[in-house]
Image (tube, helix red, strand yellow):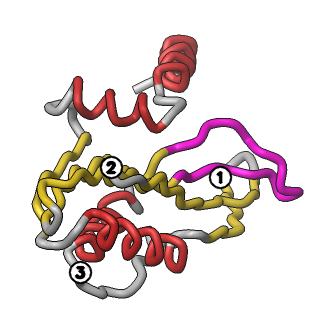
Amino acid sequence: MNVRPLLPALSVFALLSACAYPKTIGEYRQMHQDHPDFPGAKRESFQIAQPLNQVAQHVKKKASECLNASFRFTERTNTSISSGITRYQPFANISAERAEIYVTQSGLTPSGKERGLIYYIFLLDLTPISKAKTKAELYYSWGEPSPRTAKAVRAWATGQDVGCPNLAAE
């Protein structure tokens, strides 16, 4: 199939997709809540028999230890070579009423300059059910390392120490 006639349409689609991608963690949460059946969108709800602050602090600690990383890459195609850095950064906003913990992925040039879009790897929302129980909502998407990372985050939230997921694995 000759795809050359489709290139202008594909370029417009890619541009619109980039514009529609959530630019804030609130937009990412809203996208998952508004479109739960969207292919690739994952949402897990579960309860944890621990206080909110204990769960949030443990997940924040593990995310900082395991998910704060950068990797250099080089990609070769038939016509070009590109290189850069993929950076993962964890964030946590914790209060007595709620907590949100998430990780972003961004691309940097070889010199460290931002390349543009920031992607959300996962979002963990925590709210108290009682003094000793916490409700968790875990949002993520289909592309790696999101499912692998979400699996570790879910385990950390429930008190398991499963080690660090491999962010660089394909």
Is 66 colored magenta in this rendering? no
Residue type at tag 2: Arg
Q: What segment is highlighted magenta in the picture?
A: 104-119
- Given this view, does label 2 or label 1 mark the residue nearer the observer? 2
Residue drawn at x 11%, y 61% as measured from the top left: 47
Residue drawn at x 74%, y 41% as measured from the top left: 115
- Residue 98 shows which numbered tag? 2
Q: Which of 151/27 is in front?
A: 27
Q: Quadrant of the N terminus?
A: top left
Q: Which residue is mark 3?
A: 159
Q: Which of 136/143 is in front?
A: 136
Q: Which residue is mark 1?
A: 77
Q: In this view of the protein, can residue 122 be seen by the observer?
A: no
For the residue labelled by badge 1, is the local secondary structure a helix, a strand or a loop?
loop
- Left or right of 23 on screen, residue 50: left
- Left or right of 54 on screen, residue 64: right
Up-down relation of residue 23 to residue 119 (above or below): above
Indicate the position of residue 106 as horizontal and vertical percent values: 63, 50
- Given this view, does label 2 or label 3 mark the residue nearer the observer? 2
- In which quadrant of the rendered view does residue 89 lie? bottom right
Q: Quadrant of the C terminus?
A: bottom left
